[in-house]
Image (cartoon, rainbow, N blue to C red):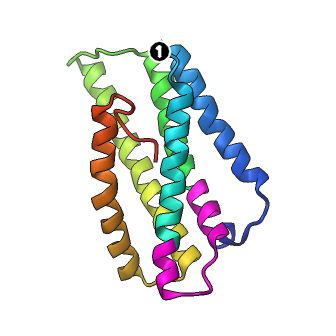
Amino acid sequence: MRRISRERDTAQLWIIFFFVFSYFLIADKVRLSADLFPLHFIVTMINFIFTVYFFYFLARLFSRETSLMPFIFTLGYSLIPTLIWFFANLILFVILPPPRTWSLPGTLFSVIYIIFSISLLFWKLILVYLGIRFSSKLSALRIVYYLALYLCIFLPYSFFLYLMALFRIPFI
């Protein structure tokens, strides 16, 4: 993440965002939703931009040398575990559609799936923490405070998106 925070080649980010766009396009076709993929993609990009600026402005309060590009790159790369999780869910939706049973294979699948999901969540949290750390050069405690503040804002917003039937799980 330290090296990524110094990147300037935006083609890497375009590739990541291309995969995000591709996910929404494919998921829309597989799940037969009402062609909402442009809206889902736009809301995801708004979430990403909000997240980048949120942490950038907080870091800027304590350091005038803070630049926006490291936040864009590091938080862009932190979308990779999210992409893997969403694509895995899409593939499993096709291969092994719900509902699943309480049989031994169903229970074993659920346990493996939960372990996989938690592993990706931890990877995501580590990437976000390191991304903010190397982009802002703030202390660990300050970053934890900022993440808590972010969650205080983002969780009600995510619940609102859920109520509006846009996302059951936000693409962060």
Compare residues 52 and 115 and report the one nearer the observer.
52
Residue drawn at x 29%, y 41% as measured from the top left: 160
Residue drawn at x 30%, y 29% as measured from the top left: 110
Tell me, yes or no, if residue 87 can be seen here.
no
Single out the residue that lies furthest toward the left: 102
Residue 147: x percent and y percent?
Answer: 36, 67
Tell me, yes or no, if residue 135 can be seen here.
yes
Give the tally of numbered discs.
1
Residue drawn at x 41%, y 16% as measured from the top left: 96
Residue 133: x percent and y percent?
Answer: 51, 75
Compare residues 1 and 119 and report the one nearer the observer.
1
The stretch in magenta equals 57-77
> Does residue 8 lie above or below 165 as drawn?
below
- Which quadrant is home to the N terminus? bottom right
The three-letter code of the residue at mark 1 reads Ala
For residue 71, which quarter of the picture? bottom right
Residue drawn at x 28%, y 20% as measured from the top left: 106
> Does residue 43 lie above or below 108 as drawn?
below
Residue 71 lies in the magenta stretch: yes
Residue that numbered label 1 is attached to: 34
Q: Secondary structure at mark 1?
A: loop
Residue 73: x percent and y percent?
Answer: 64, 61
